[in-house]
Amino acid sequence: TARIAVQAALTGHLVFATLHTNDAYSAVTRLLEMGVEDYLLASTLRGVLAQRLVRVLCPNCRQSYRPSQEELKKLGLLSRTETKLFHFQGCVDCRWSGFSGRTGLYELLPIDKELQVFITRAAQLDQMKKVAREKGFRTMLEDGWDKVKAGITTVDEVMRVTSD
């Protein structure tokens, strides 16, 4: 259980655990809902890594294209008209699916002393999000956009796994 994991962490053990949540922030909320005392969670949690898998475009048949204004708007790239994205075509190598393998979209929330304070004040978890963003926290969606722009995956794949 979550309490056993916290007890192990309190005795100096490095504990890795998995939770099913939509994002890194939700893991904090989930652990609190599971009955872990806020002060214990704040003193033992070192970070949260959230991930979702997206399909990787087949490198042999992916094709570049100029995105529509709607796609550029989704990506926050309206000022960049030179942007090119990629979509799938399908070939023998990918069995006409257009994809070959998977890669992760990640977000890492390191818990420092400032964020520990917000964990002990569960009502202020929204404020924790704001502070984490100010410290450079990047969401899975942002990681996904980077992978779209790099030609690794598609806008549709990122939207499929990040829209909750």
Image: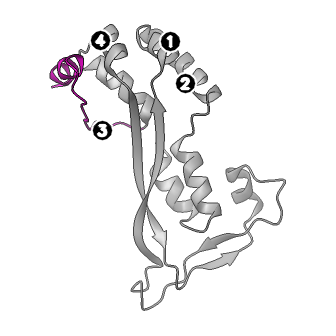
| Residue at 36% in and 29% down | 27
**Could you give the CA–CA distance between mark 4 and mark 3, rounded to whole angstroms?**
21 Å
Q: Which residue is mark 2?
A: 129
Which amino acid type corresponds to the residue marked 4 in the rendered image?
Answer: Leu
Which label sits on residue 124? Answer: 1
Q: In front: mark 2 or mark 4? A: 4
| Secondary element type, mark 3 | loop
**Could you give the CA–CA distance between mark 2 and mark 1, rounded to whole angstroms?**
9 Å
Mark 1 vs mark 3: which is more N-terminal?
3
| Secondary element type, mark 2 | helix
Q: Which residue is mark 3?
A: 20
Whether 129 is drawn above or below 48: the answer is above
Mark 4 vs mark 3: which is more N-terminal?
3
Tell me where residue 14 sits by quadrant. top left
- Which portion, as a residue range, is magenta? 1-22
Tell me where residue 92 sits by quadrant. bottom left
Which amino acid type corresponds to the residue marked 3 in the rendered image?
Answer: His
Q: Nearer the viewer, residue 68 or 42?
A: 42
Mark 2 vs mark 4: which is more N-terminal?
4
Which label sits on residue 40? Answer: 4
